[in-house]
Amino acid sequence: MKLKLWDARDIRISYQEERETEKSLTTHTSTSSSFPPPRLPLLRQSLPKENPNPNFLHRLLVVNLRRDRTDDHLPIGMPENLCELHGERMPELRSGARQARTRQNRLDDVVPQPHQPLEQAANLTGRRGRGRGTNPAGVANNPVRPVGGRGRGRGRGRGRGRGIRVIDLDPDQPCQVPGVGAGAQNLLNQAVEAPEGVAGKDLAMDNGGSGDKLLGADDDPNATPVPERVQVGNSPVYKIVKKLGKGGFGQVHVGRRVTGGIERTGPDALEVALKFEHRSSKGCNYGPPYEWQVYSSLNGCYGIPSVHYKGRQGDYYILVMDMLGPSLWDVWNSVGQQMSPNMVACIAVEAVSILEKLHVKGFIHGDVKPENFLLGQPRSPDEKKLFLVDLGLASRWKEASSGQHSEYDQRPDIFRGTIRYASVHAHLGRTGSRRDDLESLAYTLIFLIKGRLPWQGYQGDNKSFLVCKKKMSTSPELMCYPCPPPFKQFLEMVTNMKFDEEPNYAKLISLFDSLIEPCTLLRPIRIDGALKVGQKRGRLPVNSEEDEQQKKKVRLGSPATQWISVYNARRPMKQRFHYNVEDSRLNQHIEKGYEDGLFISCVASSANLSALIMDAGTGFSAQVYESSPVFLHKEWIMEQWENNFYISAIAGAANGSSLVVMSKGTPYTQQSYKVSDSFPFKWISKKWKEGFHVTSMTTSGNRWGVVMSRNSGFSDQVVELDFLYPSEGIHRRWESGYRITSIAATPDQAAFILSIPKRVVDETQETLRTSAFPSNHVKEKWARNLYIASICYGRTVS
């Protein structure tokens, strides 16, 4: 008995039009090919919006501190459910007129939250399809890290909570947070699992939720107070004079020598900065803070402040450092929140010089932003000298022993840095490298010269997701308008760098030559480091040599929605595809395939119309399917689990419906699936440890459905998640022996699962992106013994 498939929300077309658009092809030919397609750089863009905030002054005595609120920092090693920053505080202004201007700017500064659709709670009736094999289809039923010593800005608290819109005057806090990456927002999810048991299957639910917001350890009223007098190692005795500020785990105080001391800097300085970190803080779980190791390796490095003494006293680990002057954030506020091109150009070349010296030592900073660049003390010889502080998020980009570059990886649930200035690779959880410091510097320079970045103002648990999407979806032309051309050139160069590419520091510095004041005495910032670089390398004019950026595409392309198809080399076999298929005609095509000895190998959906791939190489012995208005109909899936069918292919439609295919003859022994409002990497990572691997994925609107199975035939598995197309990541995984085994995409993101098979197979694999279903391309691939292995429709690039 054949059941007619019907969906009231389906898009109807005439029988003649349908016959013209549906295709059914069969082939079996032989030749061979090789992978991979050419490497392409990634695209990052953003959109400008000028809205200068009211002027206000901060105290200029700053060292390694932030003028932030104490209620929005994210400490290192937070619980996995912690998603985002707290609401922000407005700085306290002194005059009624300035307060009025600020109130007006609050209205102008708001960035509305995207509409969040509500979950449908109605029970819908599913439909079933009759499969070929021994069992008929079942009946469908109704269904941060330490911010050591950052200053605390004065001000009144703002309300906080999901969806609150605030003016964003104060700087963002840095964080190292599991579960807050742009790929994993920890929204409300549902997991359905078939554990081993009765017939090898049962049901389990795993509900997650939005993370709670936490305060730093220093906000604990029971925390041990800092000692009134400090002496560590061979240091003099210092008396605590005043508190400069505090962050997630650290706090900075001014210490004055009890006896002696006549210098302003150095070991014999009268006053020093004392940085305290409590022994119970996350950064000190295993002894002294990691920052100590970095300072020990870098002490004496150009542009890094000197640490004179360090040690533990009582419950605190203490660093004794030079006092410095205002941060670039403070200077930016004092000059009307908009710096001149000359001043920002001087900052650019000196910052690049400092980062170069840091990178030569094998480290990346990991948190480049205005608050972490400080000037020397006012009225001192170093008052125009730039320093880079706060090494709490620094890490090695190359191995200390071998000198080899660190290995590429992506963990979408991990974010390190400050959301406003972080690179898109940091948002996506990729291993940090030199390009990330330079990209953060590009955003810092644009902020200083324009006074605002396009993604300021976003709030809520998915702030990192929205900011990363904004950074990648706006062109450099719009991002840098109306900045002088060198800033756009700088942004394009650093955002097109490969993971392990060595930056051309001299070329980056030379971009700004035309903007810098020729007279040394008139320069607002000393550029000693940049001059040394130029003397050593013969400072190249921008166009004097062949521009290496011309050797490759400056941008990968523009955001687009396309078909993504993956092809594997196979022995000649019979394969057939159908596309633009309405639900009412699914049964006809599938039954005809069954009669010809074919089984469904993969499915996809576009504009609520299905695409089917059927072939003779699946190894299945029986198959059932269901097209349902419910996204992954739980009751039907559980029923088929009881009949020893396992999910082998899934496709979700934009209208919330889905097509689920379950088969016998798979190698799977246990299966679990999850429905999530964001890509569920944390759940995937957990299941990997239990011996599961991803075997199917799909999306429905912005929802994700992921199926994981035991005994999948894979020895290892990784994820590539991107707001565009992760070309570089895919190629790096290919080079390490991984092959794409599942793909899915929403209108915003594309996810690729890459696996290493346990048994040796033909390694040839190719990918293709097309605006229309690749019917002609498939025939060409067949002629080379390449067959469709996975296909989806969603976010990519043109």
Image (cartoon, helix red, strand yellow):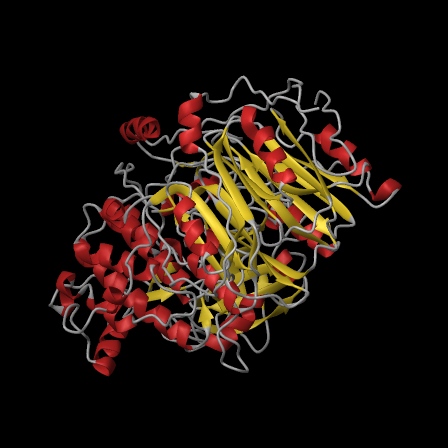
Is 331 left or right of 693, judged from the image as shown?
left
Residue 775 in the image, given as x and y percentages of width and height:
42, 44
Residue in the image at 27% along x and 62% along y: 348
Q: Residue furthest right?
A: 198
Q: Nearer the viewer, residue 249 or 297?
A: 297
Is 347 left or right of 400, judged from the image as shown?
left
Residue in the image at 62% along x and 44% along y: 598
When the figure is inspected, residue 774 is found, relative to residue 294, above or below; the finding is above
When the figure is inspected, residue 241 is found, relative to residue 641, above or below; the finding is below
Q: Quadrant of the N terminus?
A: top right
Location of residue 292 (image quadrant): bottom right
Q: Nearer the viewer, residue 224 or 451?
A: 451
Residue 531 in the image, given as x and y percentages of width and height:
22, 75
Location of residue 490 (image quadrant): bottom left
Residue 727 in the image, given as x and y percentages of width and height:
43, 57
Q: Decide if residue 572 is in sight here.
A: yes
Q: How many numbered badges does the structure rendering display?
A: 0
Q: Decide if residue 385 is in sight here.
A: no
When the figure is inspected, residue 467 is found, relative to residue 159, above or below; the finding is below
Residue 718 in the image, given as x and y percentages of width and height:
59, 57
